[in-house]
Amino acid sequence: MYMIHSWNCPQIGASPSKSNHGADFPVQWLTLYYMYRIIRFMSDVSAESPIETVSPNTKSRANIESIEHKNISVMENEIKTLRIQNEAMKAKLLEVSMIANNYVEDINNLKEQINKLTTTPLFIASVLEVENDMALIRQHGNNQEVMTQIPPEFNGEVESGMRVCVNAAFSIISVITRATDVRAQVMEVIRSPDISYDMIGGLEDVVKEVVESVELPLTNPELFENLGIEPPSGILLYGAPGTGKTLIAKAVASEASATFIRMSGSDLIQKFVGEGARLVKDVFQLAKDKAPAILFIDEIDAVGGLRTHDGTTGSAEVNRTMLQLLAEMDGFETSGDVKVIAATNRIDLLDPALLRPGRFDRVIEIPLPDESGRLEILKILTRKMNMADDVDIHKLARMTDELSGADLNVIVKEAGMFVIRRRGAFITMQDLENGFDKVVVDEDVTNVPVGMFA
């Protein structure tokens, strides 16, 4: 540092000049002078600009904080953008995974189809004999007989007469259930009709015989066992049309706690040779499998008529079907859990072999109702109707002589139609008489032959 007191220093602020000695102003003093002016200039500038008074450390800290704040905001924006992209990627990943699952299912289905197409087919064989764990089987087609061992999982299941699936080595793979015709399966009545014995009028004796022959052997077999007698194997109901044969069968189906199988005689007549006989066999087999069961054959005269042969294939097929029916009825045990009910309008057309004891032990005639029977039928038919006070059921029962229960039902319905036609609320006696005239008198006029020689 320069020693100021070693020279003659002019006053501070004075312009540089020559010293008293006449020599040039020293360089040191010039340096100090210019430094002084610089310091003054900086002081004036600091006074005019207060921002410049911040220290360099403070300015750098503020700059760093502003830069950090900008960086934080930029990073927050980037995080938001990444989150949005992440959600979009999740949605795309879910969509891709669903598509992949669909592809996996398609692949599995195709693999199953390939396995089915490439699996070695099985052969069908019939079991002829069973001895211990060995079975004698006959392959269908070539009738080759082979002795094979019964697998442990089928012990006790394989019996003589059953059909089984075998592979090329004649090993039993599975047991086939009995084949039943679909036409026989649909004959089973799943939902019983809402008909009870109380809805049948004038046939108390017939209903009693049907209950004794059909229901008691199924519900109380011990009654027959104690007496040492065999219950009837089947009953045949015959009579004029409309007397209630089918109605009794419906009541039996509703009241009996047994499987009810219904078929018509015309259902057993098939086009191709052997189809009718096979259908009869399947129906009776279905009844055995569903035992206790009641088998109702309506209009049995369509298949059980007197056997004739006119040289045609159709009559021969009908005869074969009836022979199968006779064989199946003979095959039933009399004390079994399957009962047969048949109905016909023309008993005179039935084959005598069908009417012999052992097939139909009871042949029950259902006659036309008498006056008391018609009165009871009319009470049953009109008990839910709005009848006027002038209605005389007894008079109507006397008027309807030689009419069946179906005719009385039509008369009552026609009387109701007359009331509906005039928009009435009650059925009067005149409506019943008009219904009688329309049903009976019109039928008599219609049945009169019209022609040249009438």
Image (cartoon, helix red, strand yellow):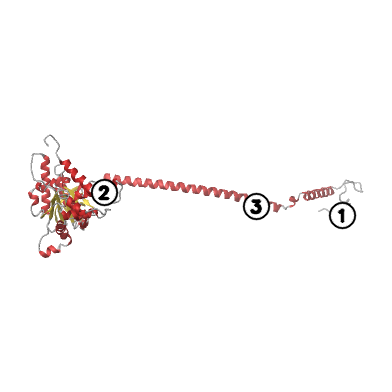
Look at label 1 and name its amino acid: His
Q: Are marks 2 and 3 in contact (CB under 8 Å)?
A: no
Residue at label 3? 65
Residue beneath the point at 12% across and 34% down: 452
Provide the residue designation for mark 2: 416
Query: Where residue 144 appears, x then y in whole percent?
Result: 14, 47
Q: Is residue 198 visible?
A: yes
Question: CA–CA distance between discs 3 and 1?
Answer: 50 Å
- Asked whether 212 or 403 is in front, the reply is 403
Marks 3, 1: nearer the viewer: 3
Which residue sits furthest bottom?
226
Looking at the picture, how far across and down is residue 381, in whole percent? 23, 53
Q: Nearer the viewer, residue 316 or 200?
A: 200
Q: CA distance from mark 1 to mark 2?
A: 152 Å
Circle 3 residues within 10 Å: few <14, some 14–19, many ≥20: few
Q: Say whether residue 234 is left or right of residue 194.
A: left
- Closer to the chain start, of discs 1 and 2, is 1
> Is the residue 413 above or below the residue 215 in the image?
above
Q: Residue 302 placed where, x, y %?
A: 14, 45
Horizontal and vertical percent position of residue 169: 19, 49
Lower sequence index among marks 3 and 1: 1
Query: Please, what secondary structure does the residue beneath circle 1 have?
Result: helix
- 37 or 346, which is in the foreground? 346
Q: Badge 1 is on which residue?
A: 5
